[in-house]
Image (cartoon, grey):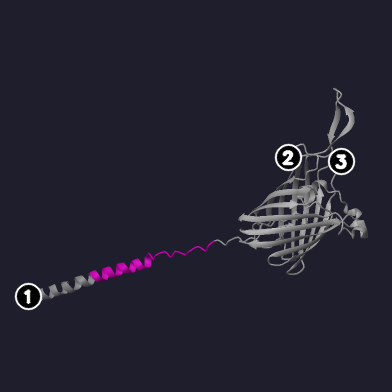
Amino acid sequence: MKTSIINRRIFKAVLIPLCLFAVIGSGYGQDSTATAPEQTTEQPAAPVKKPVKNTFENIWIIDNQTVMVPIKGTFQLDFMHRFGTIDGGYQSFFGLFGGINMRLGFNYVPKEKLLLGVSFTEYNLTWEGYAKYALIKQTQDGSIPVSATYFGDVSVDTKKEGDYPNFYNRLMYFNQLIIARKISDKFSVQVAPSLTHVQSVLGYYTGDTTADGKSVLKKEMHHDHFAIAFSGKMKLSNTLNLLLNYDQPITKHLTNNPNPNLSAALEINTSAHTFQVTVGNYQYITPQRNNYYNHNDYTEGEWLIGFVMTRLWNF
């Protein structure tokens, strides 16, 4: 009797732990298979939209600004030269010894997308202050199809002579929106509508009189002048480009309407220098004066040879 009781106790002592172990083991097995932990996958970072490079090689395309703004910390020195018109023939050696106009410009990029500059032009001893800001940039993936830049310029004539009743009348303003697209590695184009404002406008007497007997005075030209420029670059080699440009006046004045400008250039580039040999019929170099007062007619052979030379430094 005692033996059977002892055997039952031993059986219970062995059976109960085995059953607990089996239950616990099966519980862990269900957790590992029925509720497997979720695996977290890291989302890839959105690709950076890189802007296209070298839509143009310089801030200048002959007489006009391009859409380009150099990188932050860039200082650029400009030297621009226009000879006289070639229609003088040999007596002026095709303009090389004729009326000459020169411009010296200093440009700096204090922050990304913003260029500030000042220049001095020989004609009428003209000083300019200007700013240029890149609004948007064309991207390599095509999500932004064009680049757009604003250019604003104010100039003042400081020559002693001139019919200026006060300093305010010596000022001229120029505003331009430049829109460009790099079509391929070889071709880039841009279009640039502009508004010129001239403070001092000449007038003329019509010969009529008002009711009180005063003579009627009319202005020869409007104070504001709209125009549009079309420009393009064709890459000929790694260091040589062909540049083309056409400026079309839009505003119609009573008299002295300016003529359009047609120009072309060969551009030679190095890492820090750009040199453009130009031919066209703009001579003033200052953009507002070119657009408002150009009376050279390319259909009459009134072309001018010139050059644009720039030098870059990065700080």
Residue that carries the numbered disc 2 in the rendered image: 167
SS assignment at label 1: helix
> How many residues crowd around disc 2 within 10 Å: few (fewer than 14), some, or many (20 or more)?
few
Q: Helix or strand or loop: what does disc 3 sit on?
A: loop
User: Does the CB distance between marks 3 and 1 fall below 8 Å?
Assistant: no
Q: Is residue 1 visible?
A: no
Q: What residue type is labelled 3?
A: Thr
| Residue 301 placement: quadrant | bottom right
Q: Residue at x 65, y 62 (%)?
A: 313
Which quarter of the figure has residue 94? bottom right
In the displayed structure, would residue 127 be above or below residue 307?
Answer: above
Identify residue type, mark 2.
Phe
Going from N to C along the chain, the mark reached first, 3 or 1, is 1
Q: Is residue 167 visible?
A: yes
Magenta range: 20-45
Q: Distance between the residues labelled 2 and 1?
A: 130 Å
Instruction: From the image, state whether disc 3 or disc 1 is nearer to you.
Output: 3
Q: Residue drawn at (75%, 63%), measured in percent from left and top? A: 275
Relative depth, front residue between 6 and 219 = 219
Question: For residue 250, which quarter of the picture?
Answer: top right
Q: Residue lying furthest front in this view?
A: 160
User: What is the spatial separation of the Cα atoms under label 3 and label 1, in whole angstroms?
Assistant: 137 Å
Near mark 1 (Cα within 10 A), the count class, few <14, some 14-19 or many ≥20, is few
* Numbered disc 2: secondary structure: helix
- The residue wearing badge 3 is 255
Residue at image mark 1: 2
Q: Residues within 10 Å of mark 3 (few under 14, many from 20)?
A: few
